[in-house]
Image: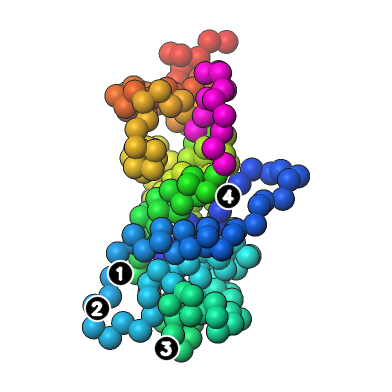
Amino acid sequence: MTSSLISVLTVTTPGTDTPPEPITDSECGGLLVAVSLVPDPRSPRGVRYPLAALLTVAVCAVLAGATSFTAIADWLYDLDEPALVRLGITRGVPAGTTVWRLLTRLDAALISTVLAGWLRSRARPQAVRPRRYRTVIAVDGKTLRGARLGDGRQVHLLSALDTSSGIVLAQVTVDTKSNEIPAFTPLLDAVERVLGSLDGVPFVADALHTQTSHAEQITARGAHLLLQAKGNQPTLLWV
């Protein structure tokens, strides 16, 4: 969990020559409000540092390039007093181990959903376009560089990317003893929580996901699925 949470906090956007717009003060406040939806696993008694403040720090630090909990703590230590007060950190700066212990107790899937909602609210509204230019969700898996599980194996994620905005709507960790196929349903569930409905939404994925069960799930939710037919589906493959 310690490494996979960093990947959840990382914002994935498509390559572009246009630099991203800076986050304004009002949008920083919006992030603080958004992450306040994440439940605090601690007992209310004796809490010194607001969870929303530490999550906001973690997100901003990762956006600035932090790839470890040590780097997140360093970013926190560099904040000036007014910034700390705005975050609600008024009783000293927490130790790096405090930040690590708290963040590793959180639900990575829930954080991913909350951040996807915040990013979608921050994205520019798009003008009405012809139906053939509608939003398409691309499903793809990736192995994270530098992220390791307790047994030393690498973390593999299955992600759903909104191709119109470049926002990763959801991502789930693939079981190290399995593959991406069982992770497809949890990923659909996560995307549906973010969008509210999958009705009419087209999905694209590689040939690995050309599965009867996937097609049935997509159809049941009113969505569409565009897949390749290869050797894993010989009755569909036409040479």
At x 44%, y 81%, the residue is 89
Marked residue nearer the N-terminal end (3 or 2): 2
Q: Are the two marked residues, 1 and 2, in contact with CB atoms closer than 8 angstroms?
A: yes
At x 34%, y 32%, the residue is 197
Q: Is residue 51 left or right of residue 141?
A: left
Where does label 3 land, which residue?
91
Q: Where is residue 231 in the image (x, y as percent from the top left)?
A: 51, 22
- The kind of residue tagged 4 is Thr
Label 3 vs label 2, nearer the camera: 3
Q: Where is residue 125 in the image (x, y as percent from the top left)?
A: 54, 37
Q: Where is residue 102 in the image (x, y as percent from the top left)?
A: 38, 74
Where does label 2 land, which residue?
44
SS at mark 3? loop
Marked residue nearer the N-terminal end (3 or 1): 1
In the rendering, which numbered label is found on residue 58?
none
At x 28%, y 75%, the residue is 42
Give, as a single range, the part of the protein colored magenta. 124-137
Where does label 4 land, which residue?
12
- The kind of residue tagged 3 is Arg
